Image: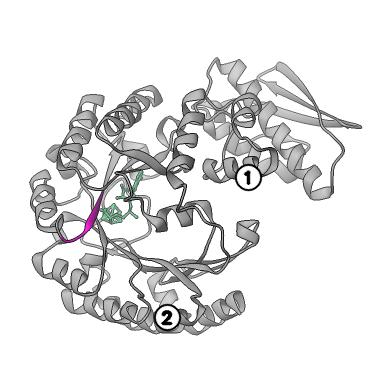
Amino acid sequence: MIDTDLTFTESELNEVINLFDGADVLKIKHRFKENGTKLVNTVTIDGKVYAYGNLVCSFKDEIERKRLVKRYAKLSLYKGLSRYLGVELPWGALTGIRPTKLAYQQIEQDGDFTEFFMDTMKVSEQKTTLVKQVLEQQKGIYKKDDDNTDFFVFIPFCPSRCKYCSFISADIKSAEKHVDEYIDTLINEIEHGKQFIKNLRSIYIGGGTPVALSDAQLERVLNAVDKVNTGVEYTVEAGRPDRITNSNLKLLKDHGVTRICINPQTFNDKTLKLLGRNHTAADVYEKYLMAKDLFSVNMDLIAGLDGESVDDFKYSLDKAVELSPDNITVHTLCIKRGSYLAENQNRLSGGEVSKMVDYAKEMLYNAGYNPYYLYRQKYMAGNLENVGYTKPNKACVYNINVMEEISSTVACGANAISKRVYNGGERIERAASPKDVVTYINKLEIIKQQKEKLFF
Ligand SMILES: C[S@@+](CC[C@H](N)C(=O)[O-])C[C@H]1O[C@@H](n2cnc3c(N)ncnc32)[C@H](O)[C@@H]1O
Ligand code: SF4
């Protein structure tokens, strides 16, 4: 915890400290002074003093003043910690989850983002280039329009819980008594939600594991979504190969689904078993062969999984490339402090995980894939990022819209967050539903009212 006299930016300063391994035990003091147009930030780390002054032009208004005061306070703390610990981080002082959105904002403001990223925020050249490549891939899809709408449906159940998972979802066996009631509530919310759609751009049924549902349950959800579908990109995050069958694939196809996820995470059976995923690499091959002529397929991999070496990850990446799905998404393990894995796993250094993501980028590029969206999370191994790669003309519109926040989202289900964008995302209003399934079921009428307030 930082000792700062800029209390309105205390949480952001703590985020900067969290970027550095082991920095949370240091004694850090931060003092701020404003001399006309000069902002002076003094950072004291275990007795060592680092002072930074930044000249700024006059502020347009108080909002802009606060934004710049925050920015330079964070940057000074980053520079102080970087010097004290002798490390530079790939994303420099950036703590936000959407570096590409920030790049677009800088381009709108100054015509370019690279100088701001590299000189001001200390982002590495490699990550700045990655952002540039993502923006390039988004050309033709990236379109700011407040009427554009994506439709999201959440299924919060899984066949079993994976030990590394950071998402909210329940084991379907233990939640069994609530599943049918959840679907009744969800269908009600979907039917209510369709009135808020203006220009539908994509549909995404995510999880959890949507195919953890029985065929009859899944069909009820698909029937409800049919009333919304107008032939747009339609993804179902099928996810777990152990739950994909010929009959649920047929159901998805019959209902107009165009894209599914079949997620290996790793092709090493030993790791899959250790993590409680209850499927093997052979299941991925088998289910991919069943699905590949019916749908565009995405595969998720995770770099930095418990017990995996750089070579283990390279093996998985090579196997995914051999299968050649349209999209491959490379996540970097993200473990919240205090979680099961944070306590138990033999964690790799950030440098090792960095070798994995660098290898992925190179091999995927050589195989004809390009990065088309990226995001960061807190507590990511090596302070890295998640990157979605795509073959030409196969980028997922939903992922781009949601990451860049350039369209509105009508979201249904527990833990779903509906968003309405104004002025191309300059301002965003949100309505979030309860995370817990039973609370969601009980609060449906309130959730519907909140959405009406948001969209009307
Ligand atoms: C919302 S999950 C749903 C996927 C689906 N249930 C499955 O397991 O195949 C989406 C993706 O997030 C990634 N993920 C989950 N927990 C993660 C973690 N702790 N760190 C990094 N990636 C994670 C996995 O790659 C997963 O496929
Ligand atoms: S199946 Fe997917 S959502 Fe469910 S626990 Fe495993 S990784 Fe998380």
Quadrant in the picture for residue 238: bottom left
- Residue drawn at point x = 49 percent, y = 35 percent: 132
Does 132 sit above or below residue 453? above
Q: Position of residue 388 (x, y in %)?
A: 36, 44
Give residue 39's position: percent from left, percent from top: 82, 30
x and y, in percent, of residue 183 in the image: 31, 79
| Residue name at image x 87 percent, y 38 percent | 58
Residue 1 locus on image (x, y percent): 63, 36
The mark found on residue 316 in the picture is: none
Q: Nearer the viewer, mark 2 or mark 1?
A: 1
The residue indicated by pointer 1 is 105
Nearest the eye: 87 or 453: 453
* Up-down relation of residue 208 to residue 73 (above or below): below
User: SS at mark 2?
Assistant: helix
Quarter of image, res 396: bottom left
Q: CA distance from mark 2 to mark 1?
A: 34 Å
Quadrant of the snapshot with the C terminus: bottom right
> Dot 1 lies on which element?
helix
Q: Quick check: marks 2 and 1 in contact, CB under 8 Å?
A: no
Q: Quadrant of ligand 2?
A: bottom left
Task: Tell me: is circle 2 under 8 Å from ligand 1.
Answer: no
Q: Which residue is mark 2?
A: 189
Q: What's the magenta region? A: 294-298
Q: Residues within 10 Å of mark 2 (few under 14, many from 20)?
A: many
Residue 175 is drawn in which quadrant? bottom left
Q: Amino acid at mark 1?
A: Gln
